Image (cartoon, rainbow, N blue to C red):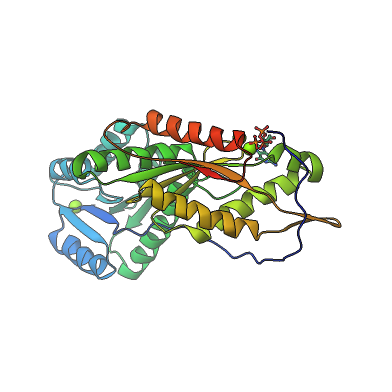
């Protein structure tokens, strides 16, 4: 099947923003032998809905660090069994860098201590006595940074859809969920039709705009728990939890309807773009990432062969 000229149209539609955020209860580990201070901090942080654990020794702290896997560490430098800087060193050496924000607190805020702590990878150094409001503001700030960072690692810059890294992670989670509790899910591959023609006719920037608009439409149409990834250039993958291929096809139908309403303007020309999709759902015979993707890809290929602008199951 050949790509014809882009279709003309006249309707006008509005864009709206899509914000993607993951709010889970953040875990803070406090390693400090000052029981009163630790308990006090725990109290005010729990009031802010953080989940807090206290370790009074370095040994216990390291154990909790590896087992409980906190999202932030508040570390005292003077501990009964060892120097807090040693703890910092051990944590940092393990991963070559601190993978969570580490806030050092100490009664001795000498420049030398600070330099040492920062060099080792501490994010902040706080002198005791601690102003709780100040610490709280700092913690919020650091979590905001962390969320931003964590998010940017798994998101495609142009479209804001998730990237392959997140696709692989989500696929692994869905597959293990399926193995444990037979929770079904669907995989769909969506590929924009004749996209090369869009670029050739209206320019690469217009093509970029179409990609962004497509992602916006999918995000507006899908459920929150559905995961949209940019799989390749103009190819996207949808992972649909608790969805069989019949339901997945219905979603793709709604996406198709909504995307058909999107009109693009380039100088005096207006046009719209279609997409083809291939869908499959998980079963005992295909419960592997590459098998699922292959099945969806073969279905997508059939859709392209049969004239595009359609979903094949
Ligand atoms: P088909 O319907 O068979 O999928 O045809 P197609 O033209 O969409 O497919 P083809 O694979 O021939 O071309 C895909 C085009 O998508 C070529 C590539 O330049 C373009 N593309 C990929 N990534 C981007 C991007 O980030 N921005 C823009 N503007 N174009 C992109
Ligand atoms: Mg102490
Ligand atoms: Mg294409
Ligand atoms: Mg393609």
Picture residue at 61% right of the left edge, 40% below the top: 234
The residue most toward the front is 306
Residue 34 location (% of width, % of height): 16, 57
Residue 257 location (% of width, % of height): 58, 58
Q: Nearer the viewer, residue 44 or 306?
A: 306
Residue 104 location (% of width, % of height): 31, 50
Q: Give the quadrant of the C terminus.
A: top left
Picture residue at 85% right of the left edge, 55% below the top: 267
Residue 88 location (% of width, % of height): 29, 40
Whether residue 287 sits left or right of residue 57 in the image: it is right
Residue 204 shows in this picture: yes
Whether residue 288 sits left or right of residue 66 in the image: it is right
Picture residue at 40% right of the left edge, 29% below the top: 290
Q: Give the quadrant of the N terminus.
A: top right
Q: Nearer the viewer, residue 279 or 22?
A: 279
Whether residue 241 sits left or right of residue 270 in the image: it is left
Picture residue at 66% right of the left edge, 59% below the top: 262
Q: Nearer the viewer, residue 313 or 24?
A: 313
Q: Can you tell me which quadrant of the image ligand 4 is in? A: top right
Q: Quadrant of residue 39?
A: bottom left
The residue most toward the right is 268
Number of numbered callouts drawn: 0
Residue 216 shows in this picture: no
Q: Is residue 9 above or below residue 185?
A: below
């Amino acid at each position: 099947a050949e790509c014809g000229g882009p279709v003309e149209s006249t309707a006008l539609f509005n864009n709206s923003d899509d914000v993607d955020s993951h709010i889970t209860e953040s875990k803070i580990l406090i390693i400090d032998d000052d029981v009163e201070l630790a308990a006090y901090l725990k109290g005010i942080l729990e009031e802010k809905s953080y989940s807090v654990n206290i370790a009074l020794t370095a040994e216990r702290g390291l154990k909790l660090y590896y087992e409980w896997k906190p999202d932030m560490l508040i570390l005292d430098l003077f501990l009964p069994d060892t120097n807090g800087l040693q703890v910092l060193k051990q944590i940092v050496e393990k991963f070559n860098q601190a993978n969570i924000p580490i806030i050092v607190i100490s009664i001795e805020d000498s420049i030398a201590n600070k330099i040492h702590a920062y060099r080792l990878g501490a994010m902040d150094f706080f002198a005791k006595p601690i102003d709780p409001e100040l610490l709280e503001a700092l913690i919020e700030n650091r979590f905001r940074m962390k969320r931003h960072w964590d998010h940017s690692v798994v998101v495609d810059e142009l479209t804001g859809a998730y990237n392959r890294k997140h696709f692989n992670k989500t696929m692994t989670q869905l597959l293990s969920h399926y193995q444990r509790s037979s929770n079904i899910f669907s995989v769909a591959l969506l590929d924009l039709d004749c996209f090369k023609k869009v670029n050739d006719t209206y320019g690469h920037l217009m093509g970029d705009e179409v990609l962004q608009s497509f992602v916006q439409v999918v995000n507006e149409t899908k459920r929150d728990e559905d995961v949209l990834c940019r799989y390749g250039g103009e190819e996207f993958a949808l992972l649909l939890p608790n969805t069989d291929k019949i339901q997945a096809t219905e979603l793709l139908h709604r996406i198709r309807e909504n995307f058909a309403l999107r009109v693009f303007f380039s100088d005096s020309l207006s046009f719209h773009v279609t997409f083809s999709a291939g869908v499959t759902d998980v079963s005992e015979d295909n419960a592997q990432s590459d098998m699922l993707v292959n099945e969806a890809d073969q279905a997508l290929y059939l859709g392209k062969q049969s004239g595009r602008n359609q979903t094949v199951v």
